[in-house]
Amino acid sequence: MSVPAARKAHESTGEKIAFAIAASVVRPLMNMLMSKEWRGTEKLRDLPGGGGFIACPNHCTELDPLTVGHMLYNQGRPPHFLAKAGLFKPPILGPLMRGTKQIPVDRGGAGAGASLRIAREVVDEGGAIIVYPEGTLTRDPGLWPMKGHTGAARLALKTGAPVVPIAHWGDHELFPRYAKRLYPFPRKKAVVAVGDPVDLSDLRDRPLDKTTLVEATERIMAAITALLAELRGEEPPATRWDPTQHEQSNHGRDVERGGTLA
């Protein structure tokens, strides 16, 4: 797939170099660790609004940002993650995060305007913003998508960018949720599926209140869950897992690595 015209026109030389450096490490590593199958990547072509979009994947292993990022980069869509602000501070990682135009997020609320500005720039340039609506690794015991947060919906409705659901399965076998090490043998296979953009058109003229955001978020989570159900060949739970109903945290690790979910 060729790089979108908007991307060619606006991506800076520095950003290209930073992505090339990161890709030179990540792609060979991912190819060595897992085989892969990508489905529905043709849906990334000819997206409305100049090609920029918000990608919303499920989240069941710390490894899956590399899985999703690998797929998007190979489609000519360098990934831009909403990442914790602390990741921009280390001396090597920080410059690389800034150089590839990742988007810092301060969960305390400070810097929200700057994050939105960078996100708008990425969308205008035809880039891909990756947002995990669950906010953290799923707490669901069966690794199904749990109740989502409204950040992805808010960003979509504020920027007008289409939301593309993405589901992946298999990479959790290489690095299980809360694992202490990789399990490379036998060699694992990751399957990534890209869905059709979530229809939020009827919500874009409504007030950006809780009702609107919750409805948009549920549509996004339903689309991700349907894709994952197809990959797994299983029926998802009738009710989405809600951490607050199980006395679990909404962010960060819920258990120590290697432990068991409550």
Image (tube, grey):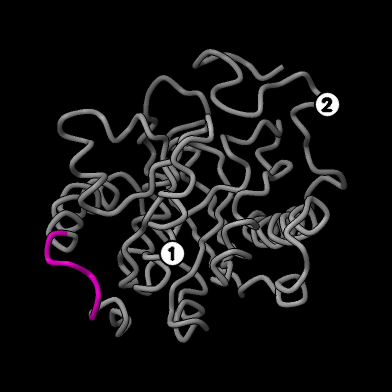
Badge 1 crowding class, 10 Å Cα cut-off, few under 14, some 14 to 19, many 20 or more, is many
Q: Secondary structure at mark 2?
A: helix
Query: What's drawn in magenta, residue-wise?
Result: 9-14
Total numbered labels: 2
- Residue matched to label 1: 120
- Residue matched to label 2: 245
Q: Residue furthest right?
A: 238
**Quarter of the rendering occupied by the C terminus:** top right
Q: Is residue 13 left or right of residue 63?
A: left
Labels 1 and 2 touching (C-beta < 8 A):
no
The image shows residue 93 at horizontal and vertical percentages of 22, 36
- Which sits earlier in the primary sequence, circle 1 or circle 2? 1
The image shows residue 26 at horizontal and vertical percentages of 24, 48
The disc labelled 1 sits on which kind of residue? Arg
Judge by depth and name the residue closer to the eye, 198 or 189.
198
Residue at x 47% of width, y 23% of height: 179
When asked about the image quadrant of residue 187, the answer is top left
Q: Is residue 26 left or right of residue 133?
A: left
